[in-house]
Amino acid sequence: GQQLNQSPQSMFIQEGEDVSMNCTSSSIFNTWLWYKQDPGEGPVLLIALYKAGELTSNGRLTAQFGITRKDSFLNISASIPSDVGIYFCAGLSGGSQGNLIFGKGTKLSVKP
Amino acid sequence: DAGVIQSPRHEVTEMGQEVTLRCKPISGHNSLFWYRQTMMRGLELLIYFNNNVPIDDSGMPEDRFSAKMPNASFSTLKIQPSEPRDSAVYFCASSSRTGSYNSPLHFGNGTRLTVT
């Protein structure tokens, strides 16, 4: 079946640094989503991408839908302690949300 | 707006007992999803409903698992009998579908199930 490879699995960064994570797949997707999960809570949508090449920002977060439609990246600029959490990418290839595939997540830890 | 509401937040039960997890989707959303999250397997889709009708239950691990959606504002996921390997966080999510457009999934805060 379809799989998403999300990297890195985890990262420690210094407060103020920029962060980059990405997802790749051997399959084509027509939607990419990025979620963040805080401890004890459900994933919360950060950014949704619907077109190849699309670059979208949400505050300090920027995400892009790769031209090949097989990848997406998420950047966080000037990280702060509350950025700690697990970030998930998710890809959708068909019309039904039942086909949404999640990556395994990138665990972000920030050193204060 | 209230988000997706799940109950209970935590459930500890003994092996063999019946467990019922509950979900109230966001008002107006017509699609509801049940996911299971573990360290090993990440987020896995168990079953989803459109307009209260189960569409795909291929992710339900065994016959011990069942889900219902009797109306647009309520769904249950039942495990009977429960086993220790069912221990996980179970998430409910909802979205709205209009024509071919799907809004992104909105997740509840999950139920952490521990089966001893």
Image: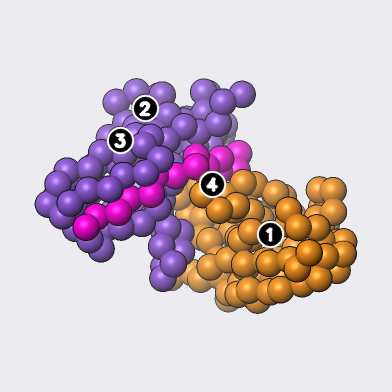
Chain colours: A orange, B purple
The chain letter for the residue carrying disc 1 is A
Judging from the image, mark 4 belongs to the subunit labelled A
* Residue A64 lies in the magenta stretch: no
> Spatial distance from mark 3 to mark 1, Cα to Cα?
32 Å
Numbered mark located on residue B77 in the image = none
- Mark 3 vs mark 4: give the one in front: 4
Q: Which residue, given by chain and number where applicable, does mark 4 sit on?
A: A41
Q: Name the residue under label 3.
A: B76
Calculate the distance from the C-alpha at mark 2 to the C-alpha at mark 1. Answer: 32 Å
Q: Is there one chain holding both mark 2 and mark 3?
A: yes
Give the numbered dot on residue B74. Answer: 2
- Say if the magenta span includes residue B112: yes
State the residue position of label 1: A84
The chain ID associated with circle 3 is: B
Residue drawn at (52%, 28%), measured in percent from left and top?
A: B26
Q: In this view, does B71 lie above or below B87?
A: above
Residue neighbourhood size for the residue with mark 3, other residues' Cα within 10 Å, grouped as few (<14), some (14–19), many (≥20)? some
Boundaries of the magenta span? B102-116
Mark 3 or mark 1, whichever is nearer to me: 1
- Secondary element under disc 4, as helix, strand or loop, is loop
Specify the quadrant that holds the C terminus of chain A.
bottom right
> Is the residue marked by circle 2 packed among few (<14), some (14-19), or many (20+) residues within 10 Å?
some
